[in-house]
Amino acid sequence: MKKIVLIEDNKDVRENTAEILELANYSVLTAENGKLGVDMINKEKPDLIICDIMMPELDGYGVLHIISKNNETAKIPLIFLTAKAEREDWRKGMNMGADDYLTKPFDDSELLDAVESRLRKSEILMSEYEQNIDGLDMFINEVRNFKDLEELSVDRKVRTYKKRTNIYFEGDTPLSLILINYGKIKTYKTNEDGKELITGTYINGDYIGYNSLLRGSVYAESAMTLEDTEVCLIPKQDFFKLIYSHRDVAIKFIKILSHNLNDREEKLLQLAYNTVRQRVAEALTSLQKQNAENDQVKGFYISREDLARIVGTAPESVIRTLSDFKDEKLIDIKSSKIYVLSMSDLENLIKRGY
């Protein structure tokens, strides 16, 4: 049974609204002012909040401001109630993050439709989706229930690329968001001398190219496959609909896109401050995790030049470090394939620096 906190200072409205909701099989907790309502929300963690705007002690805007600062309550959908119908009140509430708006007096069907709609949308936005084409399709099919998103395209292109094929080059204009269905892609920058610096490696489930789409700029780096790869191309117009048409959908979609953002930030910090041994160890552990989809897969191949570009050092330094790691029984190398013998020791080396 879904739990709703109803905050309303008018006793008759509060009791009548609670009765309608309880008859529709909702569990309803009521509060007569904003302060009591905030305490109840923090304690009960309801599925939905219905809150009057004009109240003594703490108004509805104050309630919304307080709960939005708490990670445990910020995601709870909120419907405002008000006796005023002025557009500026509606705009202020929605700009602050309210999910819906009902003007008093309202009838039973208006109330229940708003509640059911918000709870259904909340479930969609709280759902976890697989990081692949099936998960993307499920997400898009479900958010089509949102206003302004009914016309999202189902005509997404799937393309395959052979190993060491460029998907796009630095300076190209992005036309789509790219989801890796299977395979591996590196992004890299090239300096005036033609030397490459790898800025990231991506595997199935990763999205690439969204930074340039968001900025409305050309690609700041190039992207090349490291093995045979299949990608799904999401049209630019669909990307913008998901980002700009609906606030809640945008938040959910951005989380799906940036599931590896913290990893990239951490890699940049390591590139700046860690020793070559630490950086090589970090690159090896990262590549091992990307390649080891099960316990039986232990080895992986990467050219020493590509590994050096990931680490940000000369190939000769990488070769020497790999030789040291082999002597220290951290890794083994057979026919240029690298086998990690002790992930825990490599991870300890990253932390210690020696």
Image (tube, helix red, strand yellow):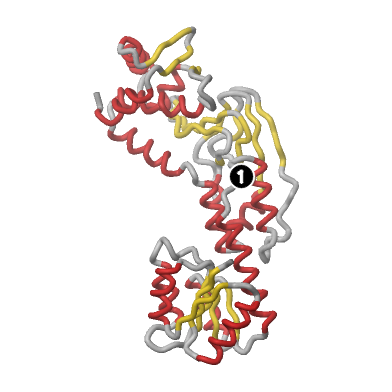
Q: For residue 293, which quarter of the picture?
A: top right
Q: Residue at x 69, y 62 (%)?
A: 145
**Residue that badge 1 annotates:** 177
Q: Position of residue 109 (x, y in %)?
A: 69, 80
Spot occupied by residue 52 in the image (x, y as percentages of width and height):
50, 83
Instruction: Tell me where residue 77 appears, x and y as whole percent.
Output: 53, 68
Q: Quadrant of residue 3?
A: bottom right
Q: Front-most of 271 and 111?
A: 111
Q: Residue at x 64, y 35 (%)?
A: 231
Q: Residue furthest right?
A: 155
As rendered, which of 91 and 105 lies closer to the eye?
105
Quadrant in the picture for the N terminus? bottom right
Residue 59, compared with residue 304, is above or below; it is: below
Q: Residue at x 61, y 78 (%)?
A: 21
| Rendered view: 255 above or below 280 | below
Q: Residue at x 73, y 52 (%)?
A: 153
Location of the C terminus by quadrant is top left
Above or below, comparing residue 1 to residue 161 in the picture: below
Decide: is 236 above or below 296: below
